[in-house]
Image (cartoon, grey):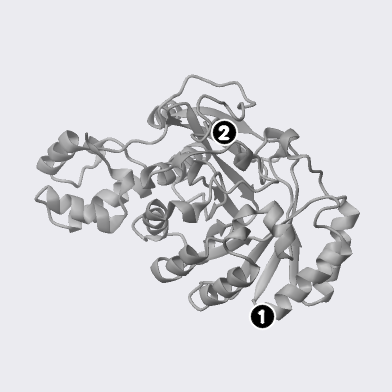
């Protein structure tokens, strides 16, 4: 089986080149061709020796994920559904704004955490993605958008690991993918502009702080253990006091001087004045420098939950702000194409329920098309 070079960060690619009898500096040239120029054909790589190109043709490939479907929102948001084999698919979402272009990337097919308000979690867990499958989402989106805009400049300025899956439960594949995103010979993204979202896998938060500290977002969603146990089952293993202490430890290494706490607003569940006061008390007691991001819930039938009323969200936000906590209300993007927060579902099989399809993809499934074919069509 040939090696997919999207699986390697620069250090891994250098080791691979050495295994072919080549100098390590060849990896830098190859890395630039793949990630900065979006090349998938070794014959395009004109500054590589012909002998090296021959070795790569025989032993390696640059293979993205087959594209199943693409949907565009009225607000400019684009959602892609990618085939990851065995009937499973993952989604990535591009969110354009005036001052940035953000790509939301998936790390797993499905999710094992099972947060009550998340449609991805309701369909169960299929498998972890490889490093190459994580990076393939960025590789495709960046070069697709450059082709569309007729630009040689970078289009994606921010990456958030907030798609399908719990990133820290796929740690070994996540870290090389992050390093590729950050590498100046790759995508050259700032550590402040790459965010890993976690539901609170405490030991791996500590590892990430040492191995590859990027911006951190924590899915909080409740100010007390009983309520968070109900909404985020992982809290039973890593309760709030442990989670908050891990956040404080992470801040020592973080590129930003705060942790973002994500808080999905659920009507009558976690959006009352007493919840806001408890949240203020939690932050003050634990002493975690933070920003609160209040997220409108995006309903789906299996949840049994409803979105908080806008006026209730405003009251909640005002109480937090008056207590000195920086608070924002996330603007809903892409909800007309099921691309908003908590809506990514794809089409995955839960391996814990043999033969049972947990959720059906709500879009028409197209014949999978290799990512490289899309780029060729755009050039023609």
Q: Residues within 10 Å of mark 2 (few under 14, many from 20)?
A: many
Above or below 140: residue 363: above
Q: Quadrant of the C terminus?
A: top left
Q: Quadrant of the N terminus?
A: top left
- Residue drawn 70% across and 64% down? 225
Q: Secondary structure at mark 2?
A: loop
Q: Residues within 10 Å of mark 1 (few under 14, many from 20)?
A: few
Q: Secondary structure at mark 1?
A: loop
What is the x, y in percent for residue 84? 43, 33
- Residue drawn 39% across and 67% down? 211
Is the Cβ of the residue at disc 2 closer than 8 Å to that at disc 1? no
Rendered image: mark on residue 236: none
Above or below 34: residue 183: below
Above or below 189: residue 37: above
Q: Tell me where residue 9 sits by quadrant.
A: bottom left
- Residue 221 visible in the shown view: no
Q: Is residue 260 left or right of residue 377?
A: right
Q: Is residue 231 left or right of residue 234?
A: right
Question: Disc 2 or 1, which lies upstream in sequence?
Answer: 1
277 and 336: which is toward the camera: 277
Q: Is residue 131 left or right of residue 22?
A: right
Task: Kindly identify which residue carries mark 2.
Answer: 346
Task: Kindly identify which residue carries mark 1.
Answer: 287
Q: Is residue 211 left or right of residue 315?
A: left
What is the x, y in percent for residue 78? 60, 38
364 and 227: which is toward the camera: 227
- CA gap between label 2 and label 1 equals 38 Å
Above or below 52: residue 22: below
């Amino acid at each position: 089986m040939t090696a997919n070079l999207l699986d390697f960060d620069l250090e891994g690619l250098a080791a691979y080149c050495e295994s072919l009898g080549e100098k390590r500096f060849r990896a830098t040239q190859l890395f630039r061709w793949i990630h900065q120029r979006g090349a998938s054909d070794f014959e395009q790589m004109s500054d590589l020796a012909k002998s090296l190109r021959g070795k790569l043709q025989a032993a390696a490939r640059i293979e993205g994920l087959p594209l199943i479907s693409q949907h565009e929102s009225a607000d400019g948001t684009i959602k892609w559904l990618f085939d990851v084999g065995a009937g499973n698919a993952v989604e990535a979402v591009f969110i354009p704004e005036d001052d940035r272009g953000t790509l939301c990337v998936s790390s797993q097919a499905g999710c094992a955490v099972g947060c009550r308000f998340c449609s991805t979690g309701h369909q169960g867990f299929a498998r972890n993605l490889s490093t190459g499958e994580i990076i393939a989402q960025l590789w495709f989106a960046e070069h697709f958008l450059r082709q569309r805009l007729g630009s040689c400049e970078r289009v994606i300025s921010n990456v958030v690991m907030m798609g399908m899956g719990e990133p820290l439960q796929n740690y070994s594949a996540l870290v090389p993918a992050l390093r590729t995103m950050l590498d100046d010979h790759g995508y050259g993204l700032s550590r402040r502009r790459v965010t890993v979202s976690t539901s609170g896998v405490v030991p791996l938060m500590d590892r990430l702080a040492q191995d590859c500290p990027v911006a951190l977002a924590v899915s909080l969603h409740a100010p007390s253990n009983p309520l968070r146990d109900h909404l985020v089952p992982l809290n039973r293993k890593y309760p709030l006091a442990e989670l908050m202490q891990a956040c404080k430890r992470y801040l020592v290494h973080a590129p930003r001087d705060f942790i973002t706490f994500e808080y999905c607003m659920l009507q009558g569940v976690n959006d009352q004045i007493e919840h806001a006061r408890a949240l203020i008390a939690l932050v003050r007691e634990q002493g975690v420098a933070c920003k609160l991001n209040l997220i409108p819930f995006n309903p789906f039938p299996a949840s049994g939950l409803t979105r908080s009323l806008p006026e209730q969200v405003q009251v909640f936000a005002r109480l937090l702000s008056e207590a000195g906590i920086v608070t924002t209300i996330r603007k809903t993007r892409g909800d007309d194409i099921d691309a908003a927060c908590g809506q990514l579902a794809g089409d995955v099989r839960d391996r814990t329920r043999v033969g049972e399809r947990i959720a059906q993809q709500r879009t028409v499934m197209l014949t999978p098309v290799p990512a490289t074919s899309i780029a060729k069509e755009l050039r023609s």
